[in-house]
Amino acid sequence: MATRSRRPLPAPAPAAQPPASFVPNATSQDLSSFEFTLITLMFGFQSWVQSCMDAAGFRGLSPMDILVLHAVDHRARSRKLADICMVLNIDDSHLVAYALKKLLAAGLVAATVTGRERHFATTPAGEEACLVYRKVREEHLVPSLAWLADRDGVLGESAGLMRTLTALYAQAGRFATAATAGRPRPPPLHTKR
């Protein structure tokens, strides 16, 4: 029986190291703590959105579908795909387009063609889904936040802080992209085996 010679596997590439001048300071450490909390808040919020819509009697929608439905329903006017993406701060329009496709199939959203663009609006069933969602939210989430009622304006201040942080993260992302624009780009990581 012939044996095959085995070649040694290549050594793994060394992990990227921060620049030698990088020393985390208190602000950086606080930001790391904030970002971890933000991650858990993000997934907790997505879980809540889905649970709330399920309790409203509209099962089978993902958190993205539900958020797109609410963005379409907001102020009861039709919106273009680009408008929905802008309102939700989503760069990848394919995510929103797929959610709209699912909402159209479910009969919660209708599309009309104006010129070369499609405009989306909620159907009566979609309006009902949003209304019942709000009722479930008022019944189950709002009372849980009653302890904040004693602290005037804390939710409004928090929303303002989050909008500011959203803008700062977007600006930092643009700066990082601009700073590395002239450098050769490494190949993308292989994520499939």
Image: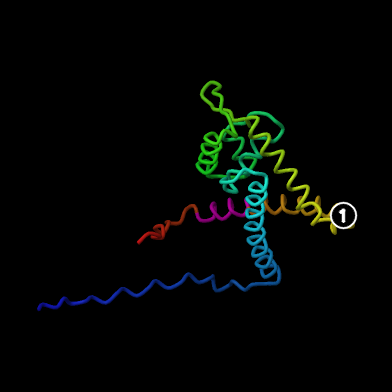
Residue furthest to the top in view is 115
Instruction: Find the residue positioned furthest to the left.
Output: 1
Is 98 placed above or below 116 here?
A: below
Q: Circle 1 sits on which residue?
A: 149
Residue shown at the point (75%, 43%) measured from the top left: 135
Q: Nearer the viewer, residue 81 or 177?
A: 81
Residue at 85% across, 59% down:
147
Q: Is residue 17 magenta?
A: no
Q: Secondary structure at mark 1?
A: helix
As rendered, which of 5 and 120 lies closer to the eye?
120
* Residue 175 % position (x, y): 59, 53
- How dense is the environment of label 1, judged by Cα within 10 Å: few (below 14), some, or many (20 and up)? few
Magenta run includes residue 178:
yes
Callout 1 amino acid: Ala
Q: Which color mode does the image show?
A: rainbow
Stretch of the chain drawn in magenta: 170-180
In the image, residue 132 sits, relative to residue 123, either above or below, namely below
Residue 152 in the image, given as x and y percentages of width and height: 89, 53
Image quadrant occupied by the N terminus: bottom left
Magenta region, mostly helix, strand or loop?
A: helix
Give left or right: position of 19 versus 31. left
Q: Is residue 112 above or below residue 184?
A: above
Give the x, y percent position of residue 88.
63, 43
Location of the C terminus by quadrant is bottom left
| Place of residue 102 in the rendered image (x, y in percent of width and height, measured from the top left) | 52, 39
- Quadrant assignment, res 33: bottom right
Say how many tags the image has: 1
Is 156 situated above or below 130? below
